[in-house]
Amino acid sequence: MTTQTAKTSVQASIVVEAPIERAFSVFTQDIGSWWPPEHHILQAELAEMVFEPRQGGHVYDRGIDGSESHWARVLAYEPPTRVVISWDVSPQWQIEADPAKTSEVEVRFVSESPTRTRVELEHRNLERHAEGWEQMRDAVGAPDGWGLGLRRFAERLTR
């Protein structure tokens, strides 16, 4: 796995042992099975994560009390090769309601063989988060940011 941080973006990639269709499906529709449980901004305990599999859908967390935290919008949904979501989280780790102050996460899935897929992630336009955006870049680019998420994703695919 590799992670690189540029001025206003973070790139990470990993090769997983899964066919491209399965990798895409688990990454999106089964996001709750691999997303680090400590990476949520709900006030309540997490009950589930929902990924609405369509452009215009949302990614959100639902608490055991029924509360919801809509933290991403699905900007592009092109199974099994590409998905783009907004990152509607402020540098203070709160929901950002202004779309002009959100970044984007593009994930590409590239088949390396019938049983291996390279997953390339770019979290870009981080400067849109305005004051404090560098903290966001450093957090998502840290080993316990996207790197942790992709490692857990790869582990999930081996189960």
Image (cartoon, grey):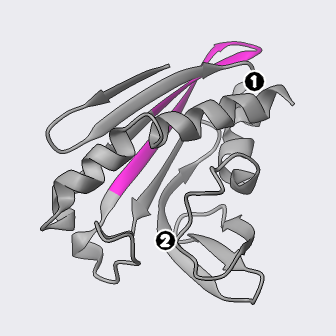
Q: Quadrant of residue 45?
A: bottom right
Task: State the residue in front, 114 or 72.
Answer: 72
The residue identified by callout 1 is: 19
Q: CA distance from mark 1 to mark 2?
A: 28 Å
Residue placed farthest to the right in the image?
A: 159
Q: Secondary structure at mark 2?
A: strand
Residue 134 rendering spot, x and y as whole percentages: 18, 52
Q: Along the horizontal axis of the image, is 54 left or right of 135?
A: right
Above or below, 50 against 133 in this view is below
Residue 19 rendering spot, x and y as whole percentages: 75, 24
Magenta-drawn stretch, dominant element (helix, strand or loop): strand
Mark 2: amino acid? Trp
Q: Along the horizontal axis of the image, is 141 left or right of 17?
A: left
**Residue drawn at point x = 55 percent, y = 53 percent:** 77
Q: Nearer the viewer, mark 1 or mark 2?
A: 2
Q: Quadrant of residue 150?
A: top right
